[in-house]
Amino acid sequence: MSVTRAVAIGCGHYLPSRVVENEEFTATLDTSDEWIRARTGIERRHFAADDERTSDLGIAAAKSALANSGIDGSEIDAIILATATPDNTFPSTATQVQHAIGAGGFAFDVQAVCAGFMYALATANSLILTGQAKCVLVIGAETFSRILDWTDRGTCVLFGDGAGAVILRAEGCAGEATDRGVLGVKLRSDGAHRDLLYVDGGPSTTGNAGKLRMLGKEVFKHAVTKLVDIADEVIEDVGVTGDDIDWLVPHQANLRIIKSSAQKASIPMSKVIVTVQDHGNTSAASIPLALASAVSTGQIKRGDLLLTEGIGGGLAWGSALIRW
Ligand code: ACO
């Protein structure tokens, strides 16, 4: 018997051309390359140009994913774009991507900050499994540099801009864990932790976009335990073991979080995709950026079993198992 599964047919990414090394921050802040590297693993990040919008980054990543998939924009019938830094309060940034690539169907944004890609992936998977869409473009795109407080050394050195995209298409298979596609996905959120990570503005409060505020140490503690727990749930649900996983593709916030969660899940660092050193934390873009980078370098190959996981403001978190 054949079942429908959401199968990744390609992916792509885009990074703005401006690269900012840690050293640049020392001109205006009491910080150092050594501190940033040691506490976060970050060495550099990309920042969008003044006239570059989140939609521009998303469109570039979408075009790269279309080329990688060998399909035309008109074959896409749904676009889900995860972002916490949309071009405007409305319309959705996804509709701008839809127009630019000539897609039909429908397009909308989802907002779960650094877990945004997990939320978008879960939604795309559901749309495909319920027959509402056949070919879904899932994008994570952020211009976090727009919401950083450049006087706060505890946050502004951590983030970067970028976009990543994955195209999922409905395909039939026998429904085994060895068959390609999204095997399982889990989402969680807990609004009780709102004050650990938020932006101090918005349309219904201050009327402006606001700046990012974070209690980093507190977020760190939640991140490791919540990521390990939710990844365990997906692994158990799907019925595979940690040894079956070829690659962990985690949210790229901090190398220490990545190492701790990999260690707790008994996944060796040789099986972990790490791009945080070059990208910083790009929020919703971080997982698809890491994924597409690793596919382009040939690390991730068709048929590999990928475990992805992300956590961010809300708190919101999620994890998925994908047979690539
Ligand atoms: N340079 C130098 N010193 C600094 C810097 C800096 N850039 N930033 C902070 N410090 C100082 C602090 O002021 C503090 O000094 P004090 O002891 O004199 O008060 C000291 O370094 C230690 O600060 P901590 O905040 O305790 O440092 P910690 O080791 O926890 O690292 C960090 C901070 C990197 C933010 C870490 O806590 C972290 O990564 N947290 C998780 C972030 C995360 O995962 N966010 C989730 C996703 S983000 C999203 O959803 C938008």
Image (spheres, rainbow, N blue to C red):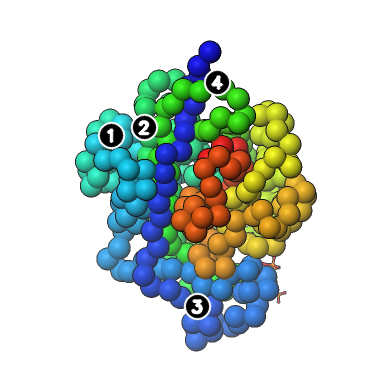
Q: Which residue type carries mark 2?
A: Cys
Q: Earlier in the sequence, mark 3 or mark 2?
A: 3
- 57 versus 127 height, above or below: below
Label 3 SS? strand
Q: Residues within 10 Å of mark 2 (few under 14, many from 20)?
A: many
Label 1 belongs to which residue?
75
Task: Please tell me which residue is depicted at 31% across the width and 69% down the height of the picture.
Answer: 50
**Residue pointed to by mark 4:** 174
CB atoms of marks 1 and 2 within 8 Å: yes
- Near-viewer residue (98 or 173): 173
Q: Position of residue 216 (x, y in %)?
A: 65, 61
Task: State the residue position of label 2.
Answer: 135
Q: Is residue 305 above or below residue 60?
A: above
- The CA distance from mark 4 to mark 3 is 48 Å
* Amino acid tagged 3: Glu
Looking at the image, which residue is at 63% across and 69% down?
41
Residue at the disc numbered 3: 21
Of the numbered discs 2 and 4, the one sitting upstream in the chain is 2
Mark 3 Cα-neighbour bin, 10 Å: few <14, some 14–19, many ≥20: some
Instruction: Give the residue type that dot 4 points to.
Output: Ala
Q: Name the one closer to the observer, 156 or 258.
A: 258
